[in-house]
Image (tube, helix red, strand yellow):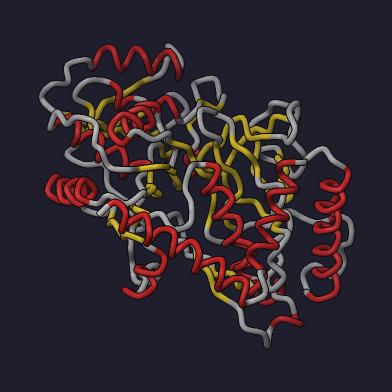
Amino acid sequence: MKLLTSCLEYLRFTFFWLLDMIKGSKIKRHYKDISYILENFSESKSKDLREKSLVDLLNHANKSTTFYKNYKNIEDFPIINKNLLRTRSKEFEAQNYTDKKTKIVSTSGSTGLALKVNQDKNKIVRNTADSIYFGKLAGFKIGYKLLYLRNWNDYYKKSPITKFIQNIEELEVVNLSDQYIDSIINKIKKDKSAKGWLGYASGYELICKHLDKTKSKPINSYVKSIIAMSESLNKYTKESMCKYFNAHVVSRYSNNENGIIAQQKIKSESFTINWASYYVEIFKLDEDTLAEKDETGRIVVTDLYNYATPLIRYDTGDLGIIDYTVSPPVFKSVEGRKTDVIYNTEGEIVSSFIIINVVEYIGVIQGQLIQESKKSYTLKLNVTNEFNQEIDVINEFKGYLGEDAEIKINYVEEIPLLASGKRKATINNYYKSNLS
């Protein structure tokens, strides 16, 4: 059986690259370009390739779009965001691509109206090459089975033929019950093929909590890689997934409208930025000027390969810090959306990891921290009867938020999912109220 699955993996691998060769080796060329740029970042050729990609994009946007017609140098381009793209979408569309075949990608709309962006064929191929390169960094290879844990609504669902060819197992993160988790684990145990996980961090967390509860032993599942996406990955989940599935876990930073922007290396907390496909900047939280060194700021991305809808200096809505002391520069941290960031009683940003690590307390299944006012917070906890450390939790959170923080614990049966199937670890109602 193992020999058969290995043969199928090899056939899928060979067929993929053979098909690409027949189509002109487009994916292979992009893959080699990404590999060279990121692995030889300080070399002059790598610098020239990155500079050429940026200049070519800016010239294209200047000549072919209404919105960018008055801008030439990257420093002159304005910061754009989702709201601007929604309300003035036609101005961002390249006129010489309107009659060409493009693909519409859409954000989930978890925190507002969904955003739809056109991507041209070359951008789609580039995203495929990015996925192959960063998948390989995490230990995943073409031909392996992909256990894909996400919200599979009609927009994302694949046909049976596509699932077979791509070797994808669609796992639904919504209503991740004990029975459903058991069925997933049993199927994995029986499947002898090499495989990788890709999914929401909160889904992994629920699986690990279930395995803890059932006192499961490590699972001989032939898992080669585990990638967490869309949500912050806490220490408990990272260590537990590694323990149960015997594979290292990395976190991926990506979005639908762009693609893979950054990903952790194995056994590293920093994120390798995809400088081959994006020009990334960090701007101050409340003004359109570049952030200082080691200052948390807004992640602003220029997509070097989408010519159908150029996204130049696009504010992703996320926060991060770039470490420029290493080559290539990396993200020291990537935080959630600005409206989900928590501040302490002195008005300073507090890392989201203070809440996502609360699950390390015995009996805590899920947690969510809500900032209600400058000094008032609600901590929602989903717990079992084993939990008896309320005072310890409050004291720990006061250490993060301030000794004058007013923390109210609200016990709930479930932390609700968003429509996308993701689960917010933090919510800042105080910040939102100040915006209105």
Q: Nearer the viewer, residue 330 or 15?
A: 15
Q: Residue at x 57, y 57 (%)?
A: 259
**Left-right relation of 301 to 86:** right
Residue 63 visible? The answer is yes
**Left-right relation of 412 to 358:** left
x and y, in percent, of residue 308 in the image? 69, 73
**Left-right relation of 202 to 311:** left
The quadrant in which the N terminus is found is: bottom left
Q: Residue at x 35, y 31 (%)?
A: 242
- View extreme (bottom): residue: 99
The image quadrant that residue 143 belongs to is bottom left
Q: Is residue 245 above or below residue 348?
A: below
Q: Is residue 97 above or below residue 362?
A: below
Q: Residue at x 47, y 37 (%)?
A: 250
Residue 418 visible? The answer is no
Q: Nearer the viewer, residue 3 or 37?
A: 3
The image quadrant that residue 152 belongs to is bottom left
x and y, in percent, of residue 401 in the image? 45, 19
Q: Residue at x 76, y 82 (%)?
A: 96
Q: Is residue 392 above or below residue 171?
A: above
Q: How many marks?
A: 0
x and y, in percent, of residue 64 in the image? 80, 76
